[in-house]
């Protein structure tokens, strides 16, 4: 079996949201300091011995979450139509990063969104 490398970065953003149709207090506008873990998988190393530079993973992630930072998520696409749940945010970041970072050697493996220090969701597509 061929080996794989997994590179991981952690970053964060702050944003507000409310959950439409939720039967509880989360249906009211509130905010979180969201933590984002991004894991990228490489089948082989590049010419200098890296799977993918951490700087490139972080730059791609920060570019994507920059549009979410200090915003009301319910006001921006696609969350103006779908609920900005941690699950939907994780899938949104995963798909956006996959378009930005994936190549013949490297692919986004998983995105984990931490809504609080004790609650998170992980989204991936390669199980």
Image: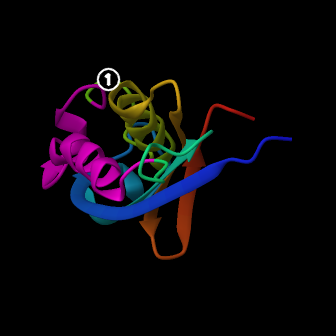
**Residue 78, position in %: x, y?**
30, 26
Reply yes or no: does residue 66 show up in magenta. Answer: yes
- Residue 73 to residue 77: above or below: below
Colour scheme of the rendered structure: rainbow
Judging by the rendered image, the residue that carries numbered circle 1 is 81
Please say whether residue 55 is one of the residues in the magenta stretch. yes
Element under disc 1: loop
Q: Position of residue 57 (x, y in %)?
A: 34, 49
Give left or right: position of 20 versus 29: right
Residue 74 vs residue 21, the one in the foreground? 74
Query: From which residue to which does the magenta span run?
Result: 52-79
The residue lying furthest to the bottom in this view is 117
Please tell me how many numbered marks the rendered image carries: 1
Q: Nearer the viewer, residue 88 or 96?
A: 96
Q: Is residue 7 above or below residue 93?
A: below
Quadrant of the rendered image containing residue 55:
bottom left
| Residue 38 seen | yes
Point out residue 70 in the picture as x, y percentages from the top left corner: 13, 55
Q: Residue 54, position in %: x, y?
A: 36, 57
* Left or right: where 53 falls relative to 41: left
- Tell whether 3 sits left or right of 16: right
Could one spot residue 28 in this view of the protein? Answer: no
């Amino acid at each position: 079996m061929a080996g794989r490398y997994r590179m991981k970065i952690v970053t964060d953003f702050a944003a507000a949201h409310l959950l439409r149709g939720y039967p509880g207090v989360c249906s009211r506008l509130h905010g979180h300091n969201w933590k984002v873990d991004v894991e990228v998988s490489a089948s082989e190393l590049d010419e200098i011995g890296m799977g993918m530079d951490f700087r490139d993973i972080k730059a791609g992630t920060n570019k994507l979450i920059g549009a979410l930072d200090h915003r009301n998520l319910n006001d921006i696409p696609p969350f103006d139509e779908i609920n900005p749940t941690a699950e939907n945010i994780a899938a949104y970041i995963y798909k956006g990063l996959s378009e930005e970072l994936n190549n013949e050697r490297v692919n986004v493996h998983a995105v984990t969104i931490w809504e609080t220090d004790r609650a998170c969701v992980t989204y991936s597509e390669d199980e």
